[in-house]
Amino acid sequence: MLISWKPLALTLTLALVACDHANAQNGFRRNRSQNTTVAQYSVTNSGSVDVAVFWVQPNGEERLYKTLRPGENYLQESFRNHEWVIRRVDTGAELSREKLNSPIQGRNVRPVAVLPNPNPTPAPGPVPNPSPNPGPNPGPNPNPGPQPAPKPADVLKAESVKAIDYLNQIRANPGAFTHLSRSLGDADVSARPALKPNAALQAAADRKAQWMAQTGQFEHVMTINGQKVGMNQWMREAGYPLAAYLPNNETNFECLYMDGGFGAKDIGKRVMDAFMSEGKDGGHVLPTLGRGWWTPCKDVAVGMAKSSDGSIYVCVLVGIYDPFNPEKTGP
């Protein structure tokens, strides 16, 4: 999930996640008189020390809202452009500072305790000059050299398949994943049929992941040549039909994730675990587990692409032609 760096023995990882709600249901309302938009801020402490969540007040002072022990998750109602800071409780060190810029935004921090190195590296001593060894000339090596590593794009395609398989495991038995969120075991969270990979949907998801990796823009609705372009349009352009009432300049079936630190291995699992940690009514859980407006969705695709700085952008699409007419497959 994650932007990772290691100052001394401290490791910090961050995750950005975002998911749009359909306009019809579960949307965020705009307060016209105050010109503010409601947002949710999800914080997960995946580290080994306590962290504190602060809201930065307009005067710059930090107000404590929540202290999280290792393994705890917290969902805070807030507003767009509100600034939040996460700090270590033991040292006060800042782990994250950001302004909310999407309806659903999250951070996963992994601070670790700073421990002394039990095996310090000894100071190097003088290195003697070795005498020449007139050994026999080596013969041909019967063992072939290392094979070339698979291309990054091929690795990400394999991880996309794993992500879909893992998501379907969660859908089949949400109650088995309460270690991610206790609410997944609630009575109103029922098993759902497996989502089916769809080639047209996959083309749209790949296109979006590549666009994010190339531009660095982590947005549901894109601005291209001055025009607002939603994923509804790109899904149609890829050959995935949508009901006419779903406008091209909106995004109704997409979840996004950005990983900047842990590489491609197991990224599919990290994506879905981050989504599920939001709880049964989280902005990513509703579409991926088929809850509410997204209950009849039957198709799925996961696109992944790596940017020049090594970050991996992920686009998850669930789809159906018309959620209000599940049996209909086209115009």
Image (cartoon, rainbow, N blue to C red):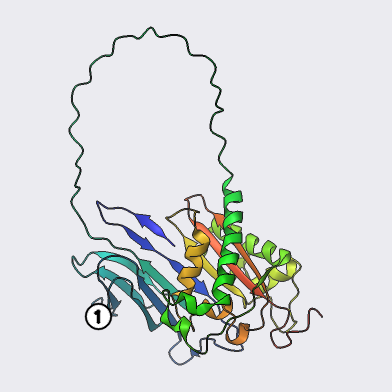
Judge whether 318 appears above or below 224 on screen: below
Q: How many marks?
A: 1
Measured as percent of width and height from the top left, residue 136 is found at: 44, 8
Work out whether residue 18 or residue 323 is closer to the camera in this orientation and state it: 323
Image quadrant containing the C terminus: bottom right
For the point 61% across and 60% down, the residue is 161
Q: Residues within 10 Å of mark 1 (few under 14, many from 20)?
A: few
Quick one: SS at disc 1? strand
The answer to whether any part of residue 230 appears in the image is no
Measured as percent of width and height from the top left, residue 44 is found at: 36, 72
Residue placed under numbered mark 1 in the picture: 63
Decide if residue 292 is on the left or right side of residue 327. Answer: left
Question: The residue under label 1 is which amino acid type?
Answer: Arg
Decide if residue 271 is on the left or right side of residue 121. Answer: right
Judge whether 175 appears above or below 231 on screen: below
For the point 28% across and 13% down, the residue is 130
Q: Residue furthest top?
A: 134
Image quadrant where residue 238 sits:
bottom right
Q: Residue furthest bottom?
A: 33
The answer to whether any part of residue 11 appears in the image is yes
Decide if residue 263 is on the left or right side of residue 144. Answer: left
Measured as percent of width and height from the top left, residue 190 is found at: 56, 85
Measured as percent of width and height from the top left, residue 88 is found at: 24, 67
Judge whether 30 appears above or below 104 on screen: below
